[in-house]
Amino acid sequence: MKSQKAFTLVELLVVIAIIGILIGMLLPAVQMVRESARRTTCLNNLKQLGLATHSYESAHMEYPPSRAADQFLTWPYYLFPYMEENNFADRLFGEKPYFEQDADLLNRSISAFICPSRARTAFVSNRESRDEPVGPVSDYAGNAGSHRYFLGDAWAQFEEPVDGVFNSGYARDNRVVNGELVGPARGRYRQASITDGTSNTFFFGEKYLNQSQLGNPSGWGDGCVLNGDEPETFMRIGGFAMPIAASQDEPLSPGELPVFGSAHPTVTNFVLGDASVHSINNQISEETLMKLCSREDGMPVSLQE
């Protein structure tokens, strides 16, 4: 009777070690592929926002305001009809403040506003700071300009001159009478206002959020993106002393440092005014970031700087 040759213990341990090494080499590659796919989805979301803004500007001859008046609806509401969200937009009331909207209607998510790299467990806000209805959160914010106008919260107000693209509308153009907005919402800018050129100016970007405070409003910057009572939620700025956040664990809250940032390892995604999308290295110089966030600084800029 022939004897069957078996593996020795040493051979078995060697095989197990080789398999372990191969798995160790494979897992990072799989994670890189998955992150690449998530980043592509994120860029596509921003592309939609850029194209919707183009469509809005073509129809209205101006860009929408980030909010027409304090507590009223924000820029997503104005872009919804150009993002196949007509049914949602038609059931909201642009002339009424956020807190008067239908709470049941607001309690929904909007997939185009969510970056899949950010590990969210919920896609509506946990609460709102003044007990308003909860609503859809967003990983994207409108570019409200550079650091130069960061005096208190002047970058979010209604009369101060600012250099962004998605700023609060002028109070004189968006009158509120008896608690309602009179007439159509008016933005501050049109294409001719982007004197640096749309290909040199950020329109939207991913916003920095503390991973442990997702869904929390006000100073944590992750309330409902439609709530015009929470500027940090739908507007961000960048420039000197306002760099892109390097991680999701920055010590300051967005209320103290309303900057851009992401859940991607080393980059943050943006869409420019020409609807082109770019993954920007988080270590981009503050000077270059300032140039890209300002629509009118008049200085040449390169995305590679």
Image (cartoon, helix red, strand yellow):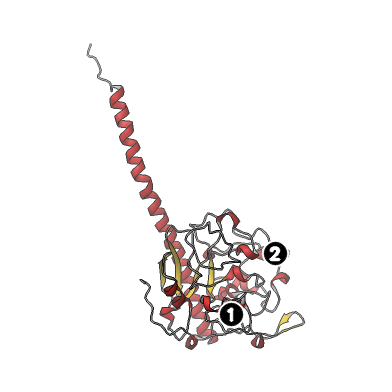
Image spot of residue 274 (x, y percent): 43, 78
Mark closest to the chain's N terminus, 2 or 1: 1
Where the N terminus falls, by quadrant? top left
- The residue depicted at 27 percent of the width and 20 percent of the height is 6
Badge 2 is on which residue?
129
Image spot of residue 212 (x, y percent): 58, 54
Q: Nearer the viewer, residue 283 or 34?
A: 283
Q: Which mark is residue 77?
A: none
Mark 1 surroundings: few (<14), some (14-19) or many (≥20) residues within 10 A: many
Count every numbered label the image shows and give the total.
Answer: 2
Question: Tag 1, which secondary structure?
Answer: loop
Amino acid type at mark 2 = Ser
* Mark in the foreground, 2 or 1: 2
- The residue depicted at 38 percent of the width and 73 percent of the height is 303
Badge 1 is on which residue?
65
Q: Quadrant of residue 22?
A: top left
- The residue depicted at 64 percent of the width and 69 percent of the height is 230
Image spot of residue 42 (x, y percent): 46, 63
User: Taking the image as drawn, is residue 208 in sight?
Assistant: yes
Where the C terminus falls, by quadrant? bottom left
User: Taking the image as drawn, is residue 223 in sight?
Assistant: no
What separation in Å lies between label 2 and label 1 (alpha carbons)? Answer: 22 Å
Q: Quadrant of residue 291?
A: bottom left
Amino acid type at mark 1 = Pro
Image spot of residue 264 (x, y percent): 45, 59
Mark 2 surroundings: few (<14), some (14-19) or many (≥20) residues within 10 A: some
Q: Nearer the viewer, residue 211 or 82?
A: 211
Left or right placement of residue 183 versus residue 2 in this view: right
- Residue ranking furthest to the right: 178
